[in-house]
Amino acid sequence: MTEQYSARECALLAAKAADEKKATDIMVQEVGAITSMCDYFVIATAANNRQVDAIIEEIEKKLREDGGIKPASREGLQEGTWALLDYGDIVVHVFQPEARDYYRLEDLWNDCPVIDLKEAGITDAEYSDRIAKLMGK
């Protein structure tokens, strides 16, 4: 990804940034073995439009300042129910609960390994019943 950070480390930086803005249901899925689209999905849930924006801004800031990378594209920011940041090797999705439940990206890629968020220093992540069950928590 950069000279300083691997794609995995940048994905974990994004997860940590989402956690710092109180995102819930944070998951980092290693999808590179199944798709050539990217190596990691970072998926998080935000309570409302303002929180979607705040999480996206924090992730962009953290990856720019600490990871030295900027997204190649940004999508969905106008609607506020879902947003995407495409960093090439990493794709970040931030959903409001209804949109997350509708798209269920984590179910589509459920054969892919989920990275333990403790690697990002996240020890008290909050999960909905559906996501907790999916992750075996």
Image (cartoon, helix red, strand yellow):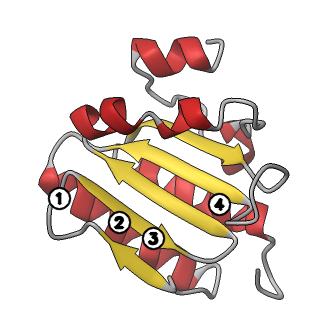
Q: Position of residue 59 (x, y in %)?
A: 45, 67
Disc 1, SS: loop
Alpha-carbon span between mark 4 and mark 1:
22 Å
Q: Which mark is residue 55?
A: none
Q: Earlier in the sequence, mark 4 or mark 3?
A: 4
- Tell me if label 2 and label 3 are in contact, CB under 8 Å: yes
Residue nearest the observer in this picture, 23 or 96: 96
Please name the residue that numbered disc 2 is placed on.
56
Q: Earlier in the sequence, mark 2 or mark 3?
A: 2
Alpha-carbon span between mark 4 and mark 2:
13 Å
- Tell me if label 1 and label 2 are in contact, CB under 8 Å: no
Tell me if residue 136 comes above or below residue 56 in the rendering.
Answer: above
Q: Quadrant of the N terminus?
A: bottom right
In screen coordinates, is 62 left or right of 13? left
Q: Residue at x 38, y 38 (%)?
A: 103
Please name the residue that numbered disc 3 is placed on.
85
Amino acid under disc 3: Leu
Q: Earlier in the sequence, mark 4 or mark 2?
A: 4
Q: Quadrant of the C terminus?
A: top right
Q: Nearer the viewer, mark 1 or mark 2?
A: 1
